[in-house]
Image: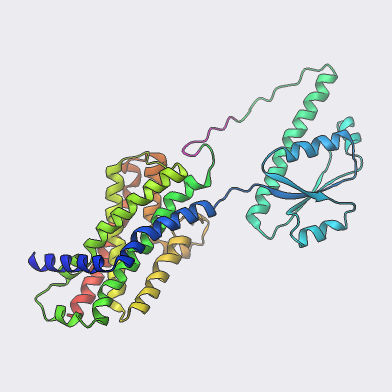
């Protein structure tokens, strides 16, 4: 116990003597949360639409007014002929071109189906699909309204549909991207800071040539690992609290579930992330290499293979298999379950178990590597 306390105190003193690194561990994740929270968004608004109106009747103007009276579309300009559409799309001046046929009003008056052409820039597949869905929803609503007005003018009572959808959105009724992204960003940022900080812990001893003093001491591998990682557990908890505070103040993301369950999940996550950092530190020989390996092992998997942005079920099976050893995958699921849904432990026990298994695996590998070194 005295040997562990000595390593623990020594590591805290080193952290205190390096205020720049301590500030980076605490403040950089908070600043990145603010940056990513505002910059990342799945909301598609202000789609620039160029218009070519061959009809130029009150009916076509009503269609355009309905289109541009919502925040999803923005009038980019008016075309004189169809040949200009490609130039507008190629130059990026418009993301979509709406072409209204010359007999639009006449066909509506006859009750016929009118085909309104929409040319959408498909370079950005997500924006293109969203824009096409917006156009389809708008025209469907408009056609229902026109049909209803025509029946009322004819004195015919409109037949009500037998089934009408009544959607009710849970957990994120405003469909704000920040509420979905912020819990995932917490897992990504904590992963990066925890792995990078501990990856430099043992390597720092090697570069300063103080590792030899530890090797000739009666220090056991588990005491060295615990003494090196527990100070960063405390820093990780402080960082977690700061990020949650900023998430609530800036983005309105509050914890709906159990704080006790959230604290346990955070400790398990730090146990696994810090174990990975110590393992990287044990197999590298310079801080530069350790930093590079830590960034590659934490940043890319945390973004791509954790479910932060891309759904895991849409990935090929081999990639899903690789994601099983990605620590943030389980922590992100736990954070979204506790923070957004107030999910109980019974719904999250698999993720808790996975974090515990990965933590044991990384820490045992790190202890074995350190023991071999000793």
| Above or below, 182 relative to 64 | below
For the N terminus, give its image quadrant. Answer: bottom left
Q: Which residue is more in the foreground, 306 or 320?
A: 306
Residue 351 is at least partly visible in this image: no
Rendered image coloring scheme: rainbow
Please state if 325 lies on the left or on the right of 205 as rendered.
right
The image shows residue 344 at horizontal and vertical percentages of: 33, 40
The image shows residue 312 at horizontal and vertical percentages of: 48, 56
Q: Residue at x 41, y 70 (%)?
A: 295
On whether residue 146 falls in the magenta region, the answer is no
The image shows residue 371 at horizontal and vertical percentages of: 18, 76
The image shows residue 132 at horizontal and vertical percentages of: 70, 48
Residues shaded magenta: 166-172
| Above or below, 358 relative to 255 | below
Q: Which residue is more in the foreground, 306 or 281?
A: 281
Q: Residue at x 54, y 41 (%)?
A: 175
Q: In the picture, residue 327 is in which quadrant? A: bottom left
| Above or below, 226 relative to 129 | below
Q: Could you tell me what secondary structure mostly forms the magenta stretch?
A: loop
For the C terminus, give its image quadrant. Answer: bottom left
Q: In the picture, residue 109 is in which quadrant? A: top right
Q: Residue at x 42, y 42 (%)?
A: 340
Please state if 139 lies on the left or on the right of 169 as rendered.
right
Q: In the picture, residue 190 is in which quadrant? A: bottom left
Residue 250 is at least partly visible in this image: yes
On whether residue 168 falls in the magenta region, the answer is yes
Q: How many marks?
A: 0
């Amino acid at each position: 116990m005295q040997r562990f306390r000595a390593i623990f105190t020594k590591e805290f003193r080193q952290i205190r003597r390096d205020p720049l690194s301590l500030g980076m561990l605490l403040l950089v994740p908070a600043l990145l949360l603010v940056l990513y929270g505002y910059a990342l968004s799945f909301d598609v608004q202000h789609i620039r639409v160029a218009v070519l109106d061959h009809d130029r009747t009150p009916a076509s103007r009503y269609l355009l007014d309905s289109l541009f009276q919502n925040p999803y579309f923005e009038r980019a300009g008016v075309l004189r002929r169809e040949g200009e559409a490609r130039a507008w799309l190629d130059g990026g001046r418009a993301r979509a071109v709406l072409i209204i046929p010359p007999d639009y009003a006449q066909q509506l008056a006859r009750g016929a189906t009118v085909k309104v052409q929409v040319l959408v820039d498909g370079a950005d597949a997500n924006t293109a699909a969203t824009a096409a869905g917006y156009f389809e929803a708008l025209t469907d609503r408009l056609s229902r309204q026109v049909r209803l007005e025509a029946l009322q003018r004819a004195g015919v009572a409109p037949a009500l549909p037998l089934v009408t959808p009544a959607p009710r959105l849970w957990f994120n009724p405003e469909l704000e991207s920040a509420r979905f992204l912020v819990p995932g960003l917490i897992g990504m940022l904590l992963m990066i800071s925890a792995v990078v900080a501990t990856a430099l812990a043992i390597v720092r001893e090697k570069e300063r040539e103080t590792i030899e003093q530890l090797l000739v001491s009666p220090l056991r591998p588990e005491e060295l690992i615990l003494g090196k990682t527990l100070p960063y557990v405390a820093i990780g908890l402080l960082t977690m609290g700061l990020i949650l505070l900023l998430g609530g103040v800036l983005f309105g993301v509050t914890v709906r579930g159990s704080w006790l369950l959230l604290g346990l999940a955070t400790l398990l996550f730090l146990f696994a992330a810090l174990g990975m950092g110590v393992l990287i530190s044990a197999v590298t020989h310079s801080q530069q290499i350790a930093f590079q390996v830590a960034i590659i092992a934490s940043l890319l998997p945390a973004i791509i293979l954790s479910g932060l942005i891309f759904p895991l079920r849409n990935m090929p099976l081999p990639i899903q298999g690789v994601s099983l050893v990605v620590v943030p995958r389980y922590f992100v699921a736990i954070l979204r379950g506790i923070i957004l849904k107030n999910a109980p432990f019974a719904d999250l026990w698999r993720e808790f178990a996975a974090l515990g298994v990965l933590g044991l695996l990384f820490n045992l590998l790190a202890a074995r590597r350190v023991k071999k070194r000793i």
